[in-house]
Amino acid sequence: MTVMLGVLLFVASYDSFRNVQASYDRTYARTHFADLTVTDDDSDAIATAVRHTGGVRRVVTRTQADRPMTINGTKLVGRVVGMTSLKDHGINDIDLTDGQLPDPAATTRCWRNVTPPTPSACR
């Protein structure tokens, strides 16, 4: 009985591992996950150097900032992450499952994550 439980536990664990790995692989391919991510103040210099490295097919830089904010009286830190052009099929693409992205032709470039999305002042 103990051996049977051990075998069942192993089979269930291994099957779960395979499912998670397959899900990760699909997401990696669909959203063009980055093979390497580097964070530094001089991202343009690093990107230029990496572009000239053999075997590198694509390099994308993004601006990222952590900004303090208050929502319903609760203080927290929000992360603002720049997006690449949707036409580029960049790296780490957005996987939008509901709603819509802001119109690239719009003059307002700041949007609040509320339903429905509404423009807000850039501060």
Image (cartoon, rainbow, N blue to C red):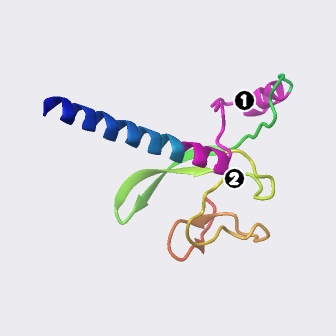
Q: Nearer the viewer, residue 36 or 40?
A: 36
| 36 drawn magenta | yes
Quadrant of the rendering where the C terminus is positioned: bottom right
Residue 20, horizontal then vertical, whole percent: 46, 43
Q: Nearer the viewer, residue 47 or 57?
A: 57
Q: Residue at x 33, y 37 (%)?
A: 11
The outermost residue toward the left is: 1
Counting the numbered discs, the total is: 2
Secondary-structure class at tag 1: loop
Read off the magenta span. Answer: 24-51
Instruction: Write down the residue under mark 2.
Output: 83
Left/right placement of residue 119 relative to residue 10 reads: right
Amino acid at pointer 1: Asp
Characterize the local packing of mark 2: few (<14), some (14-19) or many (20 or more) Cα atoms within 10 angstroms. some
Q: Residue at x 66, y 38 (%)?
A: 34
Q: Quadrant of residue 58?
A: top right
Q: Residue at x 73, y 40 (%)?
A: 61
Residue 42 vertical placement versus 74 (above, below): above
The numbered mark at residue 42 is: 1
